[in-house]
Amino acid sequence: MTNERLTKDDEGKRVLNSDGTEVGRLVRVENGRGYVASDPGFLETITAKLGWGELTEEAHPLDEGSIERITEETVYLRGTL
């Protein structure tokens, strides 16, 4: 498990599986839990980066135990989403 925690600052970041496959963008972070949209459009990506992202039914929840590491632009997963 990583010591890094998801924050609002992580919204808009790309999310990659352990094999490097991009699975989507982090569109929202609430109470340490992230929500990943698998195919966000341009507008969704920008609003997420601005902290205005909205949850949709398609957004997949992501808990901290799934995260390998977080960088400036990317959230890397331990496995696959």
Image (cartoon, rainbow, N blue to C red):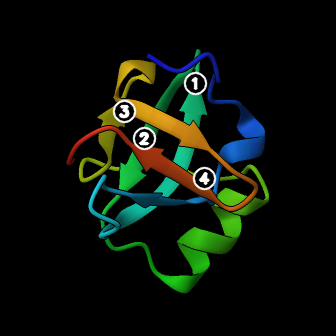
Instruction: Name which of mark 4 and mark 1 comes first in the sequence.
Output: 1
The Cα atoms of the two marked residues, 4 and 1, are separated by: 11 Å
State if disc 2 and disc 3 touch (CB < 8 Å). yes
Instruction: Name which of mark 1 and mark 3 comes first in the sequence.
Output: 1
Count residues near mark 3 (Cα–Cα under 10 Å), then give few for <14, some for 14-19, many for 20+: some
| SS for dot 3 | strand
The Cα atoms of the two marked residues, 1 and 3, are separated by: 11 Å
The Cα atoms of the two marked residues, 3 and 2, are separated by: 6 Å
Instruction: Name which of mark 2 and mark 4 comes first in the sequence.
Output: 2
Left/right of residue 57 with respect to residue 75 in the rendered view: left
Q: Which mark is residue 35?
A: 2
* Residue 76, position as x, y percentages in the image: 46, 49
State if disc 3 and disc 1 touch (CB < 8 Å). no
Instruction: Name which of mark 3 and mark 2 comes first in the sequence.
Output: 2
Count residues near mark 4 (Cα–Cα under 10 Å), then give few for <14, some for 14-19, many for 20+: many
Amino acid type at mark 4? Gly
State if disc 3 and disc 4 touch (CB < 8 Å). no
Q: Which mark is residue 30?
A: 1
* Residue 41, position as x, y percentages in the image: 46, 81
Residue occupying the point 76% across, 55% down = 72
* Residue 31, position as x, y percentages in the image: 59, 15
Q: Quadrant of residue 12?
A: bottom right
Amino acid type at mark 1? Glu
Q: Which residue is mark 4?
A: 53
Q: Which residue is mark 3?
A: 62
Q: Residue furthest bottom?
A: 42
Relative to 12, is 5 above or below? above
Count residues near mark 1 (Cα–Cα under 10 Å), then give few for <14, some for 14-19, many for 20+: few
* Residue 43, position as x, y percentages in the image: 59, 79
Amino acid type at mark 3? Leu
Residue occupying the point 68% across, 45% down = 10
Left/right of residue 79 with respect to residue 54 in the rendered view: left
